[in-house]
Image (cartoon, helix red, strand yellow):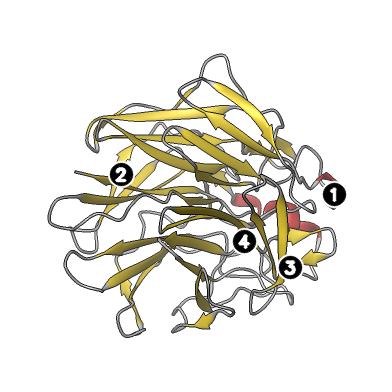
């Protein structure tokens, strides 16, 4: 994530890692959602108001659920379930380059994934800091952490180290301990294993360029550093964590090129392992994971993103990797349109 031109300010990573206990396929429905990003390239980039859904049980299919998602990009998404119904949030983002919002937008699924409301602003509460290029994750039921990003402005001096917590039940936003350094376009993930919980902020872009550092939020509610643990400096990569394992895909390298690489690390392991590379190098994309019932088999899915380091090309391609043998990536049906800098999340319904 380095050696960037002024086009840096058009790049983001929108990462949702909503770590729910991965349910069984036989009793739960699993859906990927992607929304509120940008399509096109160069001078023809436009915001999309569509919300797309991919059903894990309906192979190779994306659906357009609603066409009234916010027409902004560079926000960060997170989700939760309430009485077995889905609720999705979008934090910050921008309607135009260099101008970021502090709004918290929300939509709810009235009947599982059917009858989806249009996104609306959560009343009487906003983020404390307008931001784009941030990362968010579900904490406890109904609360979310939002970390890093970039505030209004177009220089690297506008990168943020601030971290906030939104409590949807109390309808409040409070400050948490700041990151060790200002960063944007990193990954925020949550581990849950053996009754323990941990939060990592992985990689991202600092004032000095892309970083391989991982910061962690410890029991004293402060951020500390594991050092440069990533195999290479990355920004605008995608991450997903399940139980005690995190997966990292793609991203923009220190040389300013999109990456095909995929890495995996268990919480207590000292190093990342390398998995099979994606067919398409990409950044500012989405990633999700699904675990099949009664087996050790899991499946990663990646979708969308930029495919060129000069931000001139993006993709609608979707790929899958079955993890039981580290396998190879194989194509799935494309998204309805090429997208980048979008919000995404995975929801599980029983």
Q: Which residue is mark 3?
A: 211
The x and y percentages for residue 34 are 41, 48
User: In this rendering, does residue 41 appear at all?
Assistant: yes
Residue closer to the observer: 167 or 262: 167
Cα separation, mark 3 vs mark 1, equals 18 Å
**Residue holding disc 1:** 155
Q: Which residue is mark 4?
A: 236
The Cα–Cα distance between marks 1 and 2, rounded to whole angstroms, is 36 Å
Which of discs 1 and 2 lies nearer the camera? The answer is 1
Q: x%, y% of residue 266? A: 48, 72
Decide: is 102 above or below 1. Answer: above
Task: Report the residue at 24% width, 38% height from top.
Answer: 113
Among numbered discs 1 and 2, the one appearing first in the sequence: 2
Residue 174: give x, y in percent of width and height. 65, 28
Q: Of the numbered discs in the image, which one, if any, rests on residue 64?
A: 2
Q: Secondary structure at mark 2?
A: strand
Q: Which of pointers 1 and 4 lies earlier in the amino acid sequence?
A: 1
Rounded to the nearest angstrom, the CA distance separating label 1 from label 4 is 17 Å
Question: Looking at the image, is mark 4 or mark 3 earlier in the sequence?
Answer: 3
Farthest top residue? 124
Secondary-structure class at tag 3: loop
Residue 71 in sight in this render: no
Q: Residues within 10 Å of mark 4 (few under 14, many from 20)?
A: many
**Could you say whether the residue bearing mark 1 is in a helix, strand or loop?**
loop
Earlier residue among tags 3 and 2: 2
């Amino acid at each position: 994530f380095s050696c960037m031109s002024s086009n840096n300010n058009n790049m983001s990573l929108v990462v949702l890692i909503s770590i729910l206990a991965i349910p069984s396929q036989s009793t739960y429905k699993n859906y990927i959602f992607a929304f509120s990003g940008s399509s096109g390239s160069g001078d023809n980039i436009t915001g999309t108001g569509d919300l797309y859904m991919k059903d894990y049980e309906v192979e190779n299919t994306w659906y357009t659920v609603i066409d009234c998602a916010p027409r902004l990009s560079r926000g960060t998404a997170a989700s939760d379930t309430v009485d077995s119904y889905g609720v999705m949030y979008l934090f910050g983002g921008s309607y135009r380059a260099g101008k970021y919002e502090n709004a918290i937008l929300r939509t709810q699924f009235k009947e599982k994934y059917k009858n989806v409301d249009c996104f609306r602003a959560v009343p009487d509460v906003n983020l404390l800091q307008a931001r784009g290029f941030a990362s968010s994750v579900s904490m406890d039921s109904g609360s979310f952490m939002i970390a890093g990003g970039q505030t209004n402005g177009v220089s690297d001096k506008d990168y943020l180290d601030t971290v906030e917590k939104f409590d949807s039940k109390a309808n409040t936003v409070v400050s948490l301990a700041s990151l060790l350094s200002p960063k944007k376009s990193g990954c925020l993930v949550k581990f849950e294993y053996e009754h323990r919980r941990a939060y990592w902020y992985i990689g991202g872009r600092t004032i000095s360029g892309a970083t391989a550092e991982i910061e962690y939020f410890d029991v004293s509610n402060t951020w500390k550093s594991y050092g440069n643990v990533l195999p290479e400096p990355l920004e605008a990569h995608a991450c997903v964590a399940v139980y005690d394992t995190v997966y990292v895909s793609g991203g923009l390298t220190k040389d300013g090129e999109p990456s095909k690489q995929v890495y995996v690390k268990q919480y207590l392991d000292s190093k990342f392992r390398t998995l099979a590379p994606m067919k398409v190098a990409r950044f500012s994309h989405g990633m999700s994971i699904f675990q099949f019932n009664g087996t050790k088999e899991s499946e990663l899915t990646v979708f969308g993103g930029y495919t060129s380091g000069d931000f001139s090309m993006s993709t609608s391609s979707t790929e899958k990797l079955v993890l039981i043998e580290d396998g190879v990536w194989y194509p799935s049906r494309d998204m309805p349109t090429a997208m980048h800098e979008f919000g995404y999340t995975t929801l599980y319904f029983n």
